[in-house]
Amino acid sequence: MLEIKVLLVDDQLDQLESFIVNAETKGLDIFEVKSLEEAKEVILNKKNHFDAVILDVRFYLEKGSTKVGQKAYQEAVSFFTTQEMKFFTFTGVKNLEYDESFRETYGFDEDDSEFFLKGKDDNRLIERIKTFVQEEAVNWKIRNEHYELFKLCSDQYLGQHTEKELITLLSIIQDDSEVNNNLEVYLFNPIRKLLEDLFKVLYRKDLIPLALVPNGQVRLGPSNRFCAGFDVDGFELNQPYFPRLIADQVKFILAVTQPASHRSSLDGHLELNTQNYLLKGVLYQLFDVLCWFKSFIDTHPQANNWKEVVSQNYKGIIEKDQFGNYHCGEFLLNKRFVYDHNKEGDEIEVTQFEKNTSPTTRKRYPYFVKYYL
C-alpha cells in the first residue's frame, strides 16, 4: 500500500523523534518543518504533495525566528484551509483539553476530534490520519490504486512535479463531466507535459541529442521518430529505444492532443461521439507508454548511443520498376509526386530522405525520398 504523505509543522521536532518513528512504521511518510514560512514553501512548490498536515499550536512564523506564538497557528489554519488541505492539531501543552480559554482562543469545540495531545493521543492521531486519507482523500485513493504509475514521480524518472498532471488525468477516468468544457486545460496540456518530461529525462541521461531539445523545448514528433530508430536531423540511433508499439502509441497520442489549430477533424469527431471513449483510450495508451518507460530506464540504456549520419546528395535518374514503383537507385519516390512533376528518365538530386518502413518495398529500396531537386 502507498505511504501516506504528511507535513509536520512544529518548532520542537527533536522532541517528536519517537512519534515520527512510530508514525513511519505505521505507514506515514513524515516531512518536517519548523515554521509556517517553510510549510508554505513546500506546499506551494508544485513538486510536493501531502495527504494531510499535523500542526502544533505554537511554532515559528518565519524561518530563522526564535519566537513562537498564536499568530503562526492562526495564519496556518487560514492557509491550509485555502489550500483545501486537511490538518490535525497536535500539542504538548498539558491539560489544555480542560482549558476553556485556550479552546476559545484556538477555535476548538469541547469535543473536537481533530485536537490531539502529544504523548497521550499519539496512536489516535496516527489512526485518525490513516482513516481520513484512506476513506476521504480522493487523491490518495487515486495514487494508491495506480501505485505502479506513481513510481514515476521521482527524480530518477519523470520528477515529483509530474504527480499533479497524473492525478488530473487519472481523475478524468473516474469523472469526465468537465473534460469537454476545456480539453486543453483538463486533458491535452497535461498529456503533452508528461511526454515532454519523458523526453527531457532521455536528454538529461544523454540518450537523445541536443537537437531534439533546443533551448529546453522538446520537439515531440521528431523525438519520437528518433527513439523509434529513424534518422532525424542527421542523427540516428545504433539501436532503437522504442519498440514499434510504443512509437505508434506516442504518435497517436500526439495526433489527438496536438494544438487546437490542427485539430479540426478531432473536434468534429467529438461532436458526434460524446462518450469520451477516444479520450479515455488516449489516456490508457499514455499510461502504458509511461509504465514501459520506467522499465526501459531501469535497464540503464547506453548513453550517446547514436551516430551522426553524414550523407552527400545523391544524383541519379528516375526509373520505374516492374511493380510500378518510381525510384532513383535505392531511393523510393512518391508516385503521385512524380506523376505531377516529373517523368521517367528525368535526372534528379535527392536532398533529404528517411528509412523506408513499407514491408513490401523496403528490401529493394531501403530509403524513401522526402525532398529532391
Image: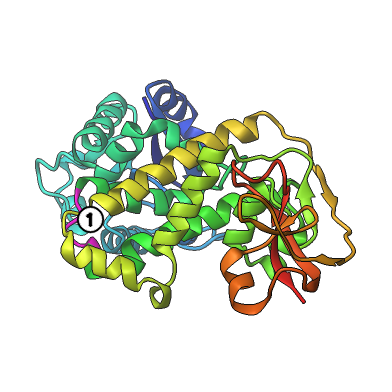
Residue 35 seen from this side: no
Q: Quadrant of residue 305?
A: top right
Say if 219 sits above or below 237 in the image.
below
Q: Find numbered disc 1 in the image and state the secondary structure of the residue it sits on.
A: helix
Quickly name the residue at label 1: 106
Q: Please indicate whether residue 2 sits to the left or right of residue 291 in the image.
A: left
Q: Is residue 210 magenta?
A: no
Residue 15 seen from this side: yes
- Residue 112 at x, y percent in the picture: 13, 43
Circle 1: residue type: Tyr
Image quadrant where one finds the C terminus: bottom right
Residue at horizontal 73%, vertical 47%?
A: 366
- Residue 190 at x, y percent in the picture: 42, 59
Question: Toward the viewer: 306 or 188?
Answer: 306
Question: Toward the viewer: 138 or 187?
Answer: 187
Q: Quadrant of residue 302?
A: top right
Residue at horizontal 24%, vertical 44%?
A: 138
Chief SS of the magenta region: loop
Magenta range is 175-179
Q: Please indicate whether residue 39 sits to the left or right of residue 131 in the image.
A: right
